[in-house]
Image (spheres, helix red, strand yellow):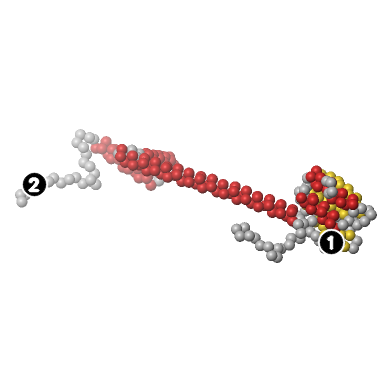
Amino acid sequence: MPDLPDLPDLPDSTAPSAPTPGTPAREQGREHGRGDRGRERLRTAVVKPSRRQVVVAVLLAVLGFAFVVQVRDTKANDTYAGLRESELIQVLDGLTGTAERARREVDRLETRRDELQDENRARSAALDEAAQRVRTLNIIAGLVPVSGPGLRVTITESTSRVAVGSLLDMVQELRTAGAEAMEFNDEIRLGADSSFENAVGGIELDDQLLEPPYVLDVIGDQHILRTALTFSTGPVETFGEDGATVDIEELDSVEITSVREATRPEYAELGSGQ
């Protein structure tokens, strides 16, 4: 290997620099002093910064943070900027498919909502009908107090006792004429299974004694009920033959407060399919 030439020695950076030729030594000393003072001020600013320097540093930090956030937002907004046309079409197709599935789900839910509303309306109508039937049956069976327009029929014995058959015929004629509720002497409610029997001092109705005069309150169409009592050979004429007088009063409101006890059928049962 050939011998390398000797390199000149580099000056030591720590050693004081030699005076520049042509520069007075005093000026070079002043420049060296200013350099030392500059480094000292820099060191002091780093170790013990002033309030103004702290404010400037904070402002620079805030500006730097805002710049970083702006750059990130710009990158986020440019997410699709670098995509090719085919890739953008795929993204658009995916969004369209998602929107279509959402629309179908909305349609399905709306259809189900309408079905539930229809079911609720049908159920509500069925419940209303059932409740109405219960009220009607309770009235017919005499299980609840009722009121309404009707007649008050007062039968007073004069020359002889009123026959049981005459009272029963009157009740049947009123039922045929559409009587909805009947009550004797403000205490005994008539029902489908009511029975009359002769008794000492009056007439026995459903095991309870009725004493004359017999007052019958009946609810229904006033004109039809009156016609059912006063037609030729009807109840009024029959009572006259028995020696009794009949007074008929039309009332806008007849109050029937007595009720019957509900009896449980002993033999009858619901038919199949009920």
Q: Which label is found at residue 5?
A: 2
Q: Residue furthest top?
A: 22
Badge 1: how crowded within 10 Å, few (<14), some, or many (20+)? Answer: some
Closer to us: 105 or 260: 260
Badge 2: how crowded within 10 Å, few (<14), some, or many (20+)? Answer: few
Q: Residue furthest left?
A: 2
Distance CA(mark 1)–CA(mark 2) = 158 Å
Q: Residue furthest right?
A: 159
Looking at numbered disc 1 in the image, what kind of residue is underneath it? Glu
Residue at (15% x, 46% y) in the render: 9
Camera-side mark, 1 or 2: 1
Residue 209 can be seen, yes or no: no
Residue at (19% x, 45% y) in the render: 11
| Image location of residue 79, percent across then percent down | 35, 41
Q: Residue furthest bottom?
A: 266
- In the image, taking residue 136 as reference, residue 105 lies left or right, namely left
Closer to us: 150 or 197: 197
| Image location of residue 247, percent across then percent down | 88, 48
- In the image, taking residue 132 as reference, residue 160 lies left or right, namely right
Given contact means CB atoms under 8 Å apart, are the residues at marks 1 and 2 in contact? no
| Image location of residue 179, percent across then percent down | 77, 50
Report helix, strand or loop for mark 1. strand
Residue 90 can be seen, yes or no: yes
Looking at numbered disc 2 in the image, what kind of residue is underneath it? Pro
Q: Which label is found at residue 130?
A: none
- In the image, taking residue 88 as reference, residue 23 lies left or right, namely left
Count numbered badges in the picture: 2
Q: Which residue is mark 1?
A: 197
